[in-house]
Image (cartoon, rainbow, N blue to C red):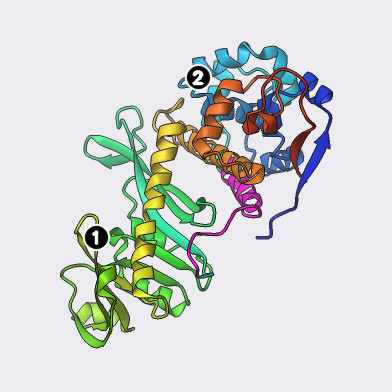
């Protein structure tokens, strides 16, 4: 998907300081006309009187950015800033209104918004850290636990409820490019088979995605994978290549499976690489269909798969996707997708500002200054709030 051009527009200090809060400037990264178009496409039921999907998004995005944990908390926080809602293009929602919209209005709107924001973020991301030019992805899933008595639709185990967040993380900017939210029982590889990775890309996956037929399908599509070979796999060695043992490499072999079912599902020859990590002393055996990259690079690709685990850790610790303000499936999915949209807004700020600040540092700055009338970029730069400031730059997506 072709990303649209990001234009940096220069404006004077005075107008911005008199009219725009930090939150207002952040929301301007989402073109309102596009949001309203998506809202119309994903609307069901009667039309609104005073409430709107934009007011819902403003309320729920504020909750994500400021760490609000309940409907009462959200509504009271916005009530304290009622005089500034006009500049956000939002109206004040009651608890019952916000709860009703979360429960009844399709969450698909925010899944579509996520796609729009992802497309634009891809236009400003840096490349991955490896020398090869192939797109690199890490694929994994994380379970979000729910109380079964409160969320009976999220049946997972006998006494436990859950949903599962499946993510294909692009290492160019560490953006969650492929995202699916399913019930907790959904097997990881079932979702993995549905993802349409670009031809020539490399996908790092763990043993939870073990599926020999899928490995063969990826090979036929020209998609490379790097995973760990199961210890009970039956195979024969076709050929061996020399390895650099001082780099921790033990062997580099071409193999083909000999198990009756395995050989039928995956007749292609694959590459087996054994590696011992110098720090932990742990031995790993990797399986890949890429015969061009160096064996050490294959090991490093699998090691880089840890970035998707860090993504799950970050989003669970810093955004609200573990405790929910509604109990229906639609309300939970709405909150999860809005959290993912907020993550992309933060990532875009990080890339566009070109400042050496982590996403967490940006979030902390926003949390403490959300309704302050300060230039957003000046805030990220660390400029002092008082005194004469240089010209500010407002990022506008057109």
Labels 1 and 2: the sequence-earlier one: 2
For residue 112: magenta?
yes
Q: Pick whichever, 77 or 103, lies toward us.
A: 77
Q: In this view, does 113 lie to the left or right of 195?
A: right
Q: Quadrant of residue 204?
A: bottom left
Q: Is residue 220 left or right of residue 210?
A: right
**On screen, residue 95 above or below 200:** above
For residue 244: magenta?
no
Residue 306 horizontal/vertical position (percent)? 36, 52
Q: Pick whichever, 293 or 31, lies toward us.
A: 293
Q: Distance between the residues labelled 1 and 2?
A: 50 Å
* Residue under numbered circle 1: 278
Q: In this view, does 323 lie to the left or right of 52?
A: left
Q: Is mark 2 on a helix, strand or loop?
A: helix
Is residue 94 visible from the viewing direction of this image?
Answer: no
User: Which region shows up in magenta?
Assistant: 110-131
Residue 174 horizontal/vertical position (percent)? 50, 51
* Residue under numbered circle 2: 71
């Amino acid at each position: 998907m072709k990303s649209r051009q990001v234009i940096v527009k220069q404006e004077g200090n005075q107008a911005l300081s008199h009219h725009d809060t930090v939150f207002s400037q952040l929301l301007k990264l989402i073109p309102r006309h596009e949001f309203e178009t998506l809202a119309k496409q994903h609307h069901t039921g009667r039309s609104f009187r005073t409430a709107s999907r934009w007011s819902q998004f403003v309320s729920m995005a504020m909750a994500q950015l400021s760490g609000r944990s309940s409907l009462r908390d959200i509504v009271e926080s916005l009530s304290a800033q009622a005089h500034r809602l006009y500049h956000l293009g939002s109206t004040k929602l009651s608890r019952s209104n916000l709860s009703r919209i979360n429960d009844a209005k399709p969450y698909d709107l925010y899944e579509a918004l996520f796609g729009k924001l992802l497309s634009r973020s891809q236009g400003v991301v840096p490349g991955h850290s490896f020398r090869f030019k192939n797109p690199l992805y890490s694929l994994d899933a994380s379970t979000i636990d729910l109380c079964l008595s409160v969320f009976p639709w999220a049946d997972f185990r006998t006494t436990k409820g859950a949903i599962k967040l499946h993510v294909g993380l692009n290492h160019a900017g560490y953006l969650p490019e492929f995202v699916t939210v399913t019930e907790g029982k959904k097997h990881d590889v079932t979702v993995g088979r549905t993802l349409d990775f670009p031809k020539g890309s490399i996908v790092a996956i763990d043993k939870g995605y073990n599926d020999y037929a899928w490995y063969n399908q990826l090979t036929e599509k020209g998609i490379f994978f790097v995973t760990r070979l199961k210890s009970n796999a039956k195979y024969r060695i076709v050929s061996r290549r020399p390895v650099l043992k001082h780099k921790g490499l033990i062997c580099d072999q071409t193999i083909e499976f000999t198990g009756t079912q395995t050989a039928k599902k995956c007749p292609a020859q694959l590459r087996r690489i054994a590696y011992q990590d110098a720090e932990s002393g742990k031995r790993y055996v990797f399986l890949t269909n890429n015969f061009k990259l160096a064996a050490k690079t294959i090991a490093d690709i699998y090691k880089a798969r840890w970035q998707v685990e860090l993504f799950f850790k970050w989003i669970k610790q810093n955004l609200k996707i573990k405790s929910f303000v509604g109990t229906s499936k639609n309300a939970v999915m709405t909150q999860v997708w809005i959290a993912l949209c907020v993550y992309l807004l933060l990532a875009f700020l990080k890339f566009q500002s070109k400042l050496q600040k982590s996403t967490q540092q940006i979030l902390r700055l926003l949390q403490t200054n959300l309704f302050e009338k300060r230039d957003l970029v000046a805030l990220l730069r660390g400029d002092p709030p008082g005194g004469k400031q240089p010209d500010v730059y407002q990022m506008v997506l057109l």
